[in-house]
Image (spheres, rainbow, N blue to C red):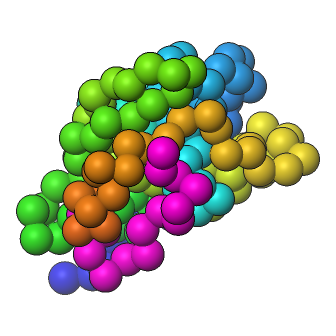
Amino acid sequence: MPLKDYQDALTRLQKGLAQAYKDSPQVLNVPGQSVACKVDPDYYLALEPVFLVLMARWAVSFPEAVLETLSHTGNAIVCKPLSTHIIPLSVTWGGQDFEVQAMFLQADFVDRALKLYAGAAAPLPVADLRIRTADRGAVEAFFGDSTPPKSLAYL
């Protein structure tokens, strides 16, 4: 059986995300308004299930196909022992704590989309969103052998 080529689907996802950002920049990196925020230079934390639903809409796809593309291309972190891309986390911004269902995306996926298709001159900065330090062990376990977010992502 031939291997599936995800390049076209990945390009559609990046173009869809870039267009959504051009239309409404607050879809990224604005805690409390965005579906994904950069928590360290390597990762975005995206809210689930809304992120996959919106990405599917923007790329004219289905949420399951979005997840398949992102996970098979290494752009979404999947916890192998649990076979899930979702992790419950406590996050904080603006002095308030919130409980969220989240997924992690490679920052390069988002940053490249914005550079190539939205004309961004530079990657977005790290947002004012932090994961509660109490969840650091769970995040590190979730990442398994992959490099987890740096200390900068926690408060």
Q: Quadrant of residue 30?
A: top right
Q: Is residue 50 above or below residue 113?
A: above
Our reading of the magenta stretch's main secondary structure is: loop
Quadrant in the picture for the N terminus: bottom left
- Is residue 134 rendered to the left or right of residue 42? left
Q: Nearer the viewer, residue 12 or 97?
A: 97
Can residue 56 be seen here?
no
Q: Nearer the viewer, residue 9 or 17?
A: 17
- Is residue 44 rendered to the left or right of residue 145? right
Residue 153 at x, y percent in the picture: 52, 52
- Kindly identify the residue that appears in the image at 67 percent across and 45 percent down: 126
- Kindly identify the residue that appears in the image at 29 percent across and 30 percent down: 100
Can residue 102 be seen here?
yes
Q: Nearer the viewer, residue 124 or 111?
A: 124
- Kindly identify the residue that appears in the image at 65 percent across and 20 percent down: 26
- The magenta span reads 142-155
The residue at the far left in this view is 82
Residue 37 at x, y percent in the picture: 55, 38
Residue 58 at x, y percent in the picture: 50, 28
| Magenta-colored stretch includes residue 22 | no
